[in-house]
Amino acid sequence: MNEDKLAPFLGTWILDTEASDFEQGEPPKSATLKIDDNFGMAVFTMNQVAADGEVTNDSFEAVPDGPEVKLGKSGLVDAMRLVFENDRNLVSEARRGGLTIMKAERELSEDGRTLTVTQTVHLVDVASFKNISVYRRAQ
């Protein structure tokens, strides 16, 4: 069942920097997001080239609508969860001490060709920042 809900999100997505809006940090020069299904586990792989040319590669995996996953001692977050809000919204939350400090809402367009990722970072006692990344499906 979750595999069917995950299927429309699968594939490689390319950042449309012109359509994106960053409140925190410089927008990257380029970025890709790849979402794979590994036997019901959603695997997210992000690669980006920063404005200064620095390359960053990162990945994480979680079971959609599964239990919260405890993470190792990264220092910033200690748990992660991934849930479907509906058929076109897949949301991950990075948590520390039971509080959500980062939320990424992935909204799939009706035609399935655009993925808008709204990432909200909550800085304790400071503010919240939103970065909106618009990705286009790679052909």
Image: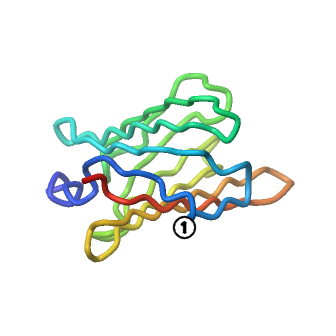
The foreground one among 53 and 113 is 53
Taking the spot 19% from the left edge, 55% from the top edge, the residue there is 7
SS assignment at label 1? loop
Q: Is residue 115 above or below residue 64?
A: below
Query: Quick check: 52 left or right of 137?
Result: right
Taking the spot 45% from the left edge, 38% from the top edge, the residue there is 46
Q: Quadrant of residue 132?
A: bottom right
Q: Pick out the residue farthest to the top.
A: 73
Q: Quadrant of the N terminus?
A: bottom left
Taking the spot 43% from the left edge, 58% from the top edge, the residue there is 135
Residue at mark 1: 19
Q: Quadrant of residue 38?
A: top left
Image location (x, y in percent) of residue 65: 32, 53
Q: Quadrant of residue 110?
A: bottom left
Classify 10 Å Cα crowding around label 1: few (below 14), some (14-19), many (20 and above).
few
Instruction: Name the residue type under label 1.
Output: Ala
Image location (x, y in percent) of residue 77: 61, 36
Image location (x, y in percent) of residue 127: 81, 59
Query: Quick check: 135 left or right of 132?
Result: left
Image location (x, y in percent) of residue 43: 32, 38
Taking the spot 24% from the left edge, 53% from the top edge, the residue there is 139
The foreground one among 64 and 47 is 47
The foreground one among 29 and 63 is 29
Q: Is residue 134 above or below residue 95?
A: below
Q: Pick out the residue farthest to the right.
A: 125
Looking at the picture, the colour scheme in use is: rainbow
Q: Is residue 109 above or below residue 98?
A: below
